[in-house]
């Protein structure tokens, strides 16, 4: 097993995390919980796709993964960033 050196973000924890545009928010916010759940579901679909599946199901799961990826990126961007687009 590889040994990791200390990993530091240099921003300190303090119960906050950065959103897609660098805005800081609390880790317990609904936004962070939602994009975490979306990311976990996307990972589960990826594991399922590793199995032998009927072609129709494989294609649908891939489509859903792409849509979940888009959803996650929208949730991770603050409203002010979305309005600028």
Image (cartoon, rainbow, N blue to C red):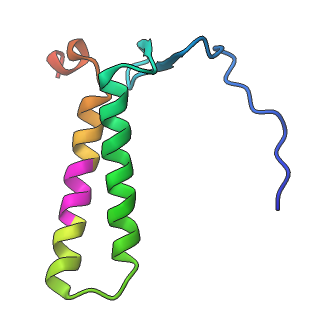
Q: Which residues are magenta?
A: 63-68
Residue 69 x/y as whole percent: 28, 48
Find residue 56 and report its image quarter.
Answer: bottom left
Q: Nearer the viewer, residue 35 or 28?
A: 28
Image quarter in which the C terminus is found: top left
Residue 80 x/y as whole percent: 22, 12
On screen, residue 72 versus residue 21, left or right, reads left
- Above or below, 81 against 53 in this view is above
Find residue 15 and report its image quarter.
Answer: top right
Image quarter in which the N terminus is found: bottom right
Find residue 32 and report its image quarter.
Answer: top left
- Secondary structure mostly seen in magenta is helix
On screen, residue 66 versus residue 50, left or right, reads left
On screen, residue 50 versus residue 67, left or right, reads right
Q: Residue at x 19, y 21 (%)?
A: 82
- Above or below, 35 against 50 in this view is above
Residue 79 x/y as whole percent: 21, 16
Q: Residue at x 38, y 38 (%)?
A: 36
Is residue 85 in the magenta section?
no
Q: Nearer the viewer, residue 77 or 34?
A: 34
Q: How many discs mark residues in the rendered view?
A: 0
- Above or below, 60 against 55 in this view is above
Q: Residue at x 45, y 12 (%)?
A: 24
Q: Residue at x 40, y 78 (%)?
A: 50
């Amino acid at each position: 097993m590889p040994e990791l050196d200390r990993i530091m973000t240099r921003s300190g924890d303090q119960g906050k995390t950065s959103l897609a545009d660098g805005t800081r928010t609390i880790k317990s916010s609904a936004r962070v919980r939602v994009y975490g759940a979306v990311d976990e579901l996307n990972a589960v679909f990826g594991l399922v796709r590793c199995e032998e599946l009927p072609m129709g199901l494989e294609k649908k799961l891939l489509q859903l993964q792409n849509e979940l990826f888009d959803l996650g990126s929208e949730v991770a961007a603050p409203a002010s960033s979305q309005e600028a687009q």
